[in-house]
Image (cartoon, rainbow, N blue to C red):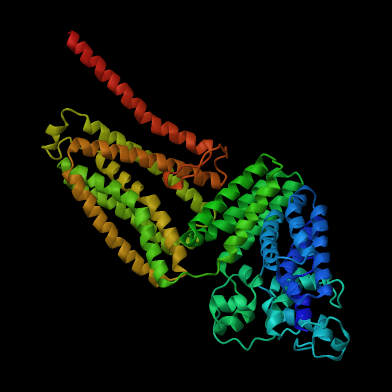
Amino acid sequence: MKRTGLLLLSLLLAAPLAAADEGASEGRTWHRLVGILQYLQADYPAAVESKSDFELAEQRSFIAEATEAAGELGAQGQAFLPRLKEIQARVDKAEDPEGVSRDCGELVEDLVLAGGLARSPRTPPNLTLGAQVFQQNCVACHGTDGRAQVPIAETMEPKPANFHDADIMAGLTPYKAFNTVGFGVPGTPMPGFPTLTEEERWAVAFYVHTLRQPACEGNPPRVSLEKLANATDPELVQAHGQEHLACLRRKMPDVDEERGLLAARSHVEQALKLGAAGDSLGARNALLDAYLNGLEPVESTLRARSPDLVLKLEKAFLDTRLAAEKKSPHLQDEGRILLSLLDEARRGSGTAAGFVSVLWLTVLILLREGFEATVIVAALLAMLRKMQATTYARVVHAGWMSALVVGALLFIFGRHLLGGANREMLEGVAALAAVVMLLYAALWLNARANMSRFMGELREKMQGALGKGSAAGLFAIAFSAALRESVETAIFLQGLAFDSASGVAWGCAAGAVALTVLVLFINRVGYKLPMKTLFKASTVLLVVTAVILLGKGLRALQEVGMVPLSPIPLFTFEPLGIFPDALTFVPQLVLAAIPLIMLVIKRRGSSTRLADASQG
């Protein structure tokens, strides 16, 4: 019977096994609760439709067991009891099958988050090992080919599942099969195999999905393990086409991004164990390892596709690390949120963007990263023209072009040079160096804008207008203004190049044209502005840019543990470098306040001199 076959292989009553190191009773209870709800989600509507007293009684026993399991989890589990009892009331009356299925699905996601549960293997499953496990443990009931056409199967009720049955496979995921292999299905002939290792259970869970598939021809689309483990065959067909299903089930993916995210997940799990044992320093160091050696190497690729998710991940890492450092009782809660975000990133980690998407992303990245540097460089060039010191324009051009060369070298060799802490430290140091140079530029411009004799010096071209040391200063300003954006652009484009190298190439060409037009426009507009207005606007621009880079630079150093964390209740607005941390925001306030204080002092001094002059 298809109905009873689906009963056997849906996650159903199984109390799923976590990783081998999640053998603690509480962890098993979380998985057991999730397993029961997944069964109800999949099978309750069919039970209501069948109007079978036996099947409906079975559903009632499952929701009662789920309620009991939640009570065993203490305060965390009891928080879900009202929702479970509301579902139980409908199940007891055999009502609202669609609503119960939907609510069970939503509750499963919330429980996975609350329990920090993993629903996929840590490494690509070995299908050869899966075949061996199947032959040793499963063929007696399911047959060598998985069709369950063996004499003993006729004596069983319900009968063993036929893995070639489309209806059965439509409700089965590797994750559900993994759980069933671990604990079996009580009340049926399906036993559990608790002596199998996690690797063996995942191997056979993925293997049974290959039994009805033809040979794989070609290569499958890029899909993450997280997605494969939690997708049914029809869901994969809908997403990628029937022609790719065999290869998706027979060729296991090995995506660089997912390997990094899996490494990060392992370090976070280790940190939570260390924190629970009272080792806050060990937990902090494990979280730093998770960020630097797990997330950071793949962050550029993830950020190019989903910048909002990367921001959430970075915030979750910092929140969890802060909880570890302060020995907060909320460490486990913060860690589970972080684990959930890592799994969310894994679900999309194997998805490659197309040519058109990569092209437009490249153009947007170039415009976003290049706009700030472009405005500063164009303003410097316009001011040199106003000063009739255009000979120094070549120095400015040499500065920003040198920064582009550095970015190009990092694009070529970045995978070897920009791993983990190296990248964050480089971004942080480059940002702080740019702050110094931009402040120097602002003071330099402000001084010249207020010199009464400066107009005469402008007409004398090079005679005293810039001074002997100004060439190096101009080079440094142009170089530092473009360096950070050049480095970030190289990192982003490197990530996108994995999806479509041609899209990056054409996007760079289009972005370069757009930036050139922008430079020419700003330069022309700047040339037409009155000199005093130009100087003042440029000074404000440079100070604002310095404030932004100060916040971003300090934040980068916080992420590698070089600057401590000191959170405050404040919003996050990354474009302005504003983060909810006193050690980034307060320095920004101080830096922004200094020019205002200097302006007030200067105006008071001018008023005093005018008053003295009038009295004299």
Q: How many marks?
A: 0
Residue 98 image point, x, y percent? 67, 67
Residue 171 position, x and y percent, is 69, 76
Up the image or down, 562 lies above or below 418; here it is above
**In the rendered image, which quarter is residue 118 located in?**
bottom right
- Left or right of 189: which side holds 263? left
- Residue name at image x 27 percent, y 40 percent: 538
Q: Is residue 177 left or right of residue 405?
A: right
User: Residue at horizontal 21%, vertical 37%?
Assistant: 533
Whether residue 253 appears in this view of the structure is yes
Question: x, y percentage for residue 277?
Answer: 77, 47
| Screen quadrant of the C terminus | top left
User: Image quarter for residue 28?
Assistant: bottom right
* Residue 567 in the image: above or below residue 349: above
- Front position in the image: 218 or 308: 308
Left or right for 453, reference 122 = left
Q: Residue at x 54, y 74 (%)?
A: 222
Camera-nearest residue between 153 and 471? 153
**Residue 22 in view, yes or no:** no
Q: Position of residue 185 (x, y in %)?
A: 83, 72
